[in-house]
Image: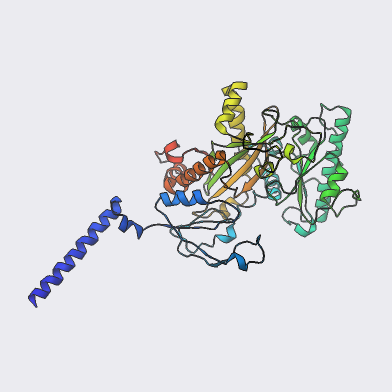
Amino acid sequence: HLEMAIHKSYTFVMIVVVGIVGGLFVETGCCTQQRTTLKKKFVLEEIASNHSHIRAALVRRGWQELVPVQQSPSTLPNENSAPVWIRQPRGWDLKWTWAWERVLPTRATPPQYANHFSNGNVLGTKIGLLHSLRTQAKSPLPPGVLPHAQYVPRTYLVVRSGEREPLVFPTEAEQEAEITAMLADIDSTANATHNNASTVGSGILSHDIDHSFITTTTIQQQHAQHTLNAGHNIWIAKPSRAARGIGIRLFNNSQDILAATFHNHNHIPPPNIPQTGDISYVVQKYIERPLLIDRRKFDVRLFVLVASLSPFAVFVNSDFYLRFATVPYTVDNLNDRYVHLCNHQVQKESPEFSEDLVTQWPASRFKDYIVEKYNEEVWNEKIIKGLHAVALSSLLSWPNRQSAHREGSFEVYGLDVMFDWQLDPWLLEINASPGLHLLTSIVHTHHTQFVDDMFKVILDNKECWMNVAKNHSKCQSTTELYGKLQLLFLGV
């Protein structure tokens, strides 16, 4: 009995020692076996995108993937159907998915990270963005925030009854007033074009129309946006919820625009203009005098990370990239998508597209071009400050930030910006959940770097920038902390 008791005591002591040592190993990171039991877990829901670099960045940080059980593709209605998950993993610490409705958090503390806020998609729709900007303009703007007429081409909403958004146009009368204002703008610009191609329109809108929901008058916008004009009165119509250039068309007269976008108006559409179904549109002044490189149009895709809504924390990626059209710019053919649309998904179908044709630039090459053609001051004061002003001014229109805040949520946006011939930036749209496809060497480098930097901000060094908000941190916004992401704004 004594011998058995001694053996049990020795075994107990060994278990305690091993447990203590194992705990020490966990703290010092010496024991991989012990650390696996403490790994944080993530879920990736993939649809029409590439998340391999997200997975790789988390695995490098010691995270473990939980894989949802997905319904067999052969049992779905068709090949374009969204995937159906039979069983969702629980107990995750981070979830990357395509919409807030898919987040489905299961606990409050510790927070579960997710790449969406409850209303993060508002700025990502063309109608939601413009409505937010108009609402923002009804109150005094904070210092450093631009009126949207200075960086968004004047835009009108054509909301069809089947897709009516009551927060935008509660009444039919308001929609009618919007259409009337749009036609007046188009026609007055056309008149100015015919009279003098170098001036802007001077037509006056009817005083009988209620423009209380339009924050700046059309005539003021015309003069603020004279650099967009080149005497052609071109307008661009975009489906409100489409992406990748789908459904976009260019026009140069009001009747064709009206016929193609609005079927519920007194005007009779010309028989040669096809109707496009019950789809809402934004109609926007086209930038007729864009900055050209090698005679081709381009736009800038700028990634922005909103790391928190309370405090409002905005990080901007210094490593944006350019997307070029494959065909030299001309206004002779408004139907040539390869001249007018810079989206890579459009341009890769162009007959001119080839591996030898440069269709993208990193920010560093754009800087070299601007510094050589102008100087470094132009790069810093016009290009970089202009992009930052556009990003900050537009994102500060985010509605109901305090109530929409959720600890652990964050949002990634892709801003599409175009420079005019005077190097002034114009925001074309904001893309929620921008695609992370690794289609070219430029975006492969860009996306991989951005994802890693994003997790530096969200996971690795969150306390640093959060403590800056509390005014008692020694942390600096350095490359080691945030990579190529720069803290653009931190406040309310």
In the rendering, at what x and y percent does residue 58 appear? Answer: 44, 51
The image quarter containing residue 21 is: bottom left
**Residue 195 in the figure: left or right of residue 307:** right
- Given the current orientation, which residue lies at the most extreme bottom position? 1
Q: Nearer the viewer, residue 473 or 225?
A: 225
Q: What residue sits 66% from the left and 66% below the top?
A: 77
Q: Name the spot of residue 326 as percent of width and height, x first.
A: 69, 36
Q: How is the image coloured?
A: rainbow
Residue 46 appears anywhere in the view: yes
Give the number of callouts. 0
- Is residue 357 found left or right of 468 in the rendered image? right
Would you place residue 362 above or below residue 94 in this image?
Answer: above
From the viewer's perspective, tell me whether residue 483 is left or right of residue 28: right
Res 378 quadrant in image: top right
- Image-quadrant location for residue 235: top right
* 299 on left or right of 336: left
The answer to whether one can see residue 144 in this image is no
Task: Check the image and report above or below for 422 versus 269.
Answer: above
Residue sitting at x 61%, y 25%: 370
Q: Quadrant of the C terminus?
A: top right
Closer to us: 426 or 248: 248
Q: Position of residue 49 (x, y in %)?
A: 58, 52
The residue depicted at 14 percent of the width and 69 percent of the height is: 9
